[in-house]
Image (spheres, rainbow, N blue to C red):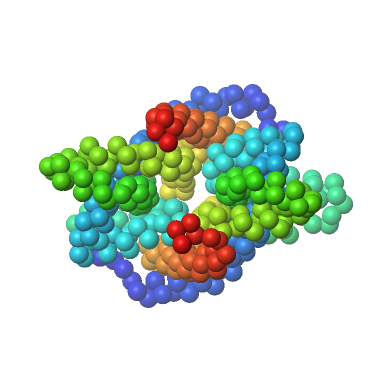
């Protein structure tokens, strides 16, 4: 058995140095996904004509695209066309000035918008229609009904699904190493290219991810208890 | 450089890429068939609460669910040779094609994910059903096979479908360890002709078609399974 503990430790440290990059790749898409995803879900649930069905088509189709393939395409277009775009907008920047982590963030954001919108749509559909009618009958506007009545009830239903999405996003963020962004996986294997201890490098990356997802799931349990506090349990 | 996207190059790529779909499908088929078997073994260990083994299985499932597919792929790719070569005195890296590492990874991964699906499906069936079967003189296997299994299929089907869609998508990662699946082929076309966008777009279309058809099949299956439900309820 070939397992060198020193190489493992070194890789672990290198991986942790690049943890902030992974955090960026997770949290920015998460915020974008939550805001746009909620919007898309609302548009689809309230059946806004034309836009609703267009978004439904987009979400369904885009969910069939593997993230790594999408990422390669965006990176290619970014590499080839960024200079033209910058020239068109009279920006004084070139493709070499821009960190391509933004390509990764863009690809992950689109994926998370789609999956989060599906999760939130499911939660919205689980809320009784009578709630809308009740809101109308006491004179709330449509927006007030959504913000004050529907969304607060939707959150506890959506949370388990959203946690799955967050964990999925953490895991998906590792594929950005395919376009040369240095995050946990690529970082943990930096020493490996010198020592040839790739197994130890990837093992270290796996440990970091495992701990990361365990922390997220632990927090999720707490959050679930907190948000579910006001939900009436049918069996009580 | 010329045009970024040209339709004639796109059409030229179709016969070049489509044959490699068999690699993608073989990974998915191996992963599903052996993954189901592995998943059943894991569930058996969990339900029978075999001491020692069931804790081990718990850690295994948690690891598979908590780490990225990419990392698992790399761990298997570098780990199997590193762990087995010194023991067996083999040179697995030379003897195995890259695709074998992909098979191993995907089977291990699917085993864990499917076991979670099966476990929740089995536990969703009230234990009284099993007790009823046993009290009617069925053996444990008969009870499972005739009473629990038909009911659990219904619950397990929708998550199994979305798992399969995810599996197809994840299989696109294997090009990173040098397996030539459709994505790997698209990359080699890119290096050979310097025009890769058409190939990538074709790959995207193939994946979208696969994902939509898998979903359609499972949607139909699901409707069929729920056929008798309304009459009772």
Q: Is residue A4 left or right of residue B49?
A: right
Which residue extends farthest right? Answer: A90
Q: Is residue B73 visible?
A: yes
Residue B26, how many percent across, how many down?
36, 35
Of residues B228 and B105, the one nearer the viewer is: B228
Q: Is residue A227 left or right of residue B18?
A: right
Of residues A123 and B204, the one nearer the viewer is: A123
Residue B122, how many percent across, how many down?
31, 48
Residue drawn at x 28%, y 59% as measured from the top left: B57
Q: Quadrant of the N terminus of chain A?
A: bottom left
Of residues B127 and B32, the one nearer the viewer is: B127
Residue drawn at x 39%, y 71% as measured from the top left: A8
Q: Is residue B76 left or right of residue B129?
A: right
Residue B91, how many percent across, how many down?
26, 53
Q: Is residue A83 visible?
A: no
Of residues A82 and A138, the one nearer the viewer is: A138
Residue B130, how many percent across, how many down?
23, 47
Which image quarter: residue B10? Answer: top right
């Amino acid at each position: 058995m070939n397992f060198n503990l020193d190489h493992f430790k070194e890789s672990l440290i290198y991986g942790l140095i690049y943890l902030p990059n992974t955090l960026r790749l997770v949290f920015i898409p998460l915020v974008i996904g939550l805001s746009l995803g909620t919007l898309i879900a609302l548009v689809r649930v309230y059946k806004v004509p034309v836009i609703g069905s267009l978004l439904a088509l987009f979400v369904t189709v885009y969910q069939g695209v593997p993230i790594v393939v999408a990422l390669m395409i965006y990176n290619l277009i970014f590499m080839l066309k960024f200079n033209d775009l910058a020239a068109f907008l009279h920006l004084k920047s070139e493709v070499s000035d821009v960190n391509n982590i933004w390509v990764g963030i863009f690809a992950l954001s689109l994926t998370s918008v789609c999956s989060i919108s599906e999760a939130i749509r499911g939660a919205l559909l689980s809320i009784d229609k009578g709630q809308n009618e009740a809101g109308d009958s006491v004179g709330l506007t449509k927006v007030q009904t959504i913000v004050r009545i529907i969304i607060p009830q939707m959150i506890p239903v959506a949370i388990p699904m959203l946690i799955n999405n967050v964990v999925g996003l953490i895991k998906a963020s590792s594929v950005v190493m395919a376009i040369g962004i240095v995050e946990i996986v690529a970082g943990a294997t930096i020493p490996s290219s010198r020592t040839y201890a790739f197994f130890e490098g990837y093992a270290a990356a796996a440990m970091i991810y495992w701990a990361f997802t365990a922390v997220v799931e632990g927090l999720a349990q707490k959050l679930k208890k907190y948000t579910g506090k006001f939900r009436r349990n049918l069996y009580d | 450089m010329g045009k970024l996207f040209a339709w004639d190059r796109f059409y030229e790529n179709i016969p070049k890429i489509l044959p490699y779909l068999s690699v993608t499908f073989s990974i998915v088929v191996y992963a599903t068939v052996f993954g189901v078997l592995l998943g059943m073994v894991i569930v058996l260990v969990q339900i029978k609460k075999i001491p020692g083994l069931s804790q081990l299985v718990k850690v295994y499932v948690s690891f598979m669910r908590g780490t990225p597919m990419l990392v698992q792929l790399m761990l298997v790719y570098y780990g199997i040779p590193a762990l087995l070569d010194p023991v067996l005195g083999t040179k697995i890296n030379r003897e195995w094609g890259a695709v074998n590492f992909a098979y191993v990874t995907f089977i291990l991964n699917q085993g864990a994910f499917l076991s979670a699906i099966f476990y929740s499906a089995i536990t969703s069936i009230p234990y009284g059903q099993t007790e009823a079967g046993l009290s009617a003189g069925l053996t444990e296997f008969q009870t499972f096979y005739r009473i629990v299994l038909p009911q659990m299929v219904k619950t397990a089907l929708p998550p199994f479908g979305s798992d399969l869609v995810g599996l197809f998508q994840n299989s696109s990662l294997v090009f990173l360890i040098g397996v030539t699946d459709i994505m790997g082929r698209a990359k080699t076309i890119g290096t050979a002709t310097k025009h890769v966008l058409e190939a990538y777009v074709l790959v995207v279309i193939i994946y979208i078609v696969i994902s939509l058809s898998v979903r359609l099949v499972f949607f139909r299956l699901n409707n069929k399974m729920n056929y008798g439900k309304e009459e009772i309820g």
